[in-house]
Image (tube, rainbow, N blue to C red):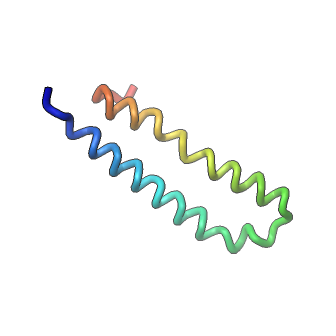
Amino acid sequence: MTPSWRKPAGVLAILALIAVWSVVVASVAGWVSGWAWPLQLVFYLFTGLVWIAPLKPLLLWMETGRWR
């Protein structure tokens, strides 16, 4: 069995996704810091979990080569 190129490409895509998402969230942190702490909590919980959504199709593609 020869290793697939999809796995290293997928890992790089995941790292890029995390980097882009963290830059986006950090760029609005100054604006969010003026909110009340319960709203900040909800915002950071939401943004901390929402980046996981694109991982399912990406991981499926890495394993099978199909997006669905």
In this rendering, would 38 be left or right of 16?
A: right
Determine whether 43 is above or below 29 in the image: above
Q: Is residue 5 left or right of residue 50?
A: left
In the rendered image, residue 23, in percent from the top left (x then y), is placed at 52, 65
Identify the residue shown where x is 81% and y is 57%. 39
Expressed as whole percent of the image width and height from the top left, the position of residue 19 reads 46, 60
Residue 23 lies left or right of residue 16; in this view the side is: right
Q: Which residue occupies 86% across, 64% down?
A: 36
Q: Position of residue 33 (x, y in %)?
A: 75, 70
What residue is at 13 percent from the left and 31 percent from the top?
A: 2
Residue sitting farthest toward the left? 2
Give residue 16's quadrant in the image: bottom left
Q: How many marks?
A: 0
Q: Would you say 28 lies left or right of 4 here? A: right
Dividing the image into 4 quarters, which one contains the N terminus? top left
User: Residue drawn 63% across and 51% down?
Assistant: 48
Q: Nearer the viewer, residue 24 or 10?
A: 10
Figure quadrant of residue 50: top right
Q: Is residue 34 above or below residue 68?
A: below
Q: Quadrant where the C terminus lies? A: top left
